[in-house]
Image: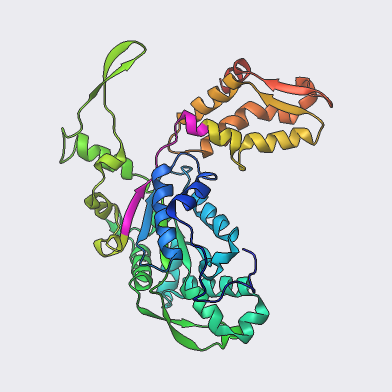
Amino acid sequence: MTQTTDSPKIGQTVSLPTPVQISDALGRRVIGQRRAIREMAIALAKYLAGAATGNILMIGASGTGKTTLMRAVEEYLDDHPELAERSTVIRVHANVLGEEARQGRPGQAVIGRLLEEARRELGPKVAESHPERVLERARRGLVFIDEVDKIRSHVGDRPNVEGIRAQEALLTLIENEAVPVELPPWAGGQTIKFDSSELLFVCAGAFEGLFDAVYDRVTIGRDKGALQPTTVVEGGQVRQRVVFRLRNWLKNEDLFDYGMTPQFLSRFDAVVLLEDLGVKELTQIFLESPESGLLQSKAYFESRGVRLTLSPDAVEKIAEEASRQPRLGARALKEVFRRVIREYEFDPEAAGATEGKALLIDGEQVVEALR
């Protein structure tokens, strides 16, 4: 984030964005996760207004957009310097919490990073001459916890001590307790009680195995028979098909069984399930996302004076192949496209991609490459 030494003073009136405005902005970066975007927009609007805000737990397979949504929030705040008093955002891996709890310093990593980020935003000179401004900004921080599913309290029948410690450490912060923290030397170096009551926590994880566990519960487990097949029309034929969506069947008990303690879960007002990405969303990501392998490959060919183009049916076939790997989400696009494009990138001239020419890849070439 940019430094904002001339940001509005605390208490100064600024025009606060509405959830709709925030949702529109986040939706330009995050594709296919309307529910998650709206939940984040509501929480962020409350947070920026200084109102009481519930913490969020996001559950979604790898590649569905959890980290992208976090980055979109960071970019949104970075683009609006008038919101600087509440723009201090950090991301922490959940396992860090367990390690520091083992060392008897729960909360030190989170608060320490908030202080360093606030110092960077204000600038070292302002921070060192007015450390109270750094503390004030850090107290209003937004904390993203990545891979929170890695701190489950047990794995199978075995307790996960590090996970238990990490959940307890995070609870210490979320419960708004006065957290003891050692200030860095530039802020005086003394130990203080840090008020975490205004922090907003957004935790996210893939929760590998949760989908299968809930599916088993409603098909062969204690709720056997709850999931009934539905009648669908496919290719002009009427068929019976079992349609399972995790959001329709997930219970708190499933998360308890997974290893998230009741005390931990009770601190989240919203549990948001991200959708698996379909062909439509994957196509849009493939064509538009800044991280798309297609855009990266186009830039590579442009550096050689070659214009890379994919036909509509080629794009569709790549998206369809990626959709067959729902556990990878958008990451499957890169794996599939790599199989298609690698020979062309290795020897463009052999494929007729000489300088000043266009390289067109059609559906038949995609099918051949994916065999």
Residue 51 placement: quadrant? bottom left
Where is residue 64? Give x, y as percent. 46, 42
Does residue 225 appear anywhere in the picture?
yes
**Numbered label tally:** 0
Q: Residue at x 54, y 23 (%)?
A: 316
Q: Residue at x 26, y 65 (%)?
A: 263
Is residue 92 depicted above or below 363 in this figure? Answer: below
Q: Dividing the image into 4 quarters, which one contains the N terminus?
A: bottom right
Where is residue 323? Give x, y as percent. 46, 30
Give, as a single range, the part of the protein colored magenta. Answer: 269-282
Compare residues 59 and 52 and report the one nearer the observer.
52
Q: Which color mode does the image show? A: rainbow
Where is residue 283? Give x, y as percent. 53, 30
Is residue 347 depicted above or below 238 in this figure? Answer: below
Q: Is residue 155 magenta?
A: no
Q: Residue at x 53, y 71 (%)?
A: 85
Q: Residue furthest right?
A: 355
Where is residue 126? Give x, y as percent. 64, 81
Residue 326 placement: quadrant? top left
Q: Residue at x 46, y 60 (%)?
A: 144
Compare residues 15 and 220 and report the one nearer the observer.
15
Compare residues 30 and 247 and report the one nearer the observer.
30
Is residue 80 depicted above or below 326 in this figure? Answer: below
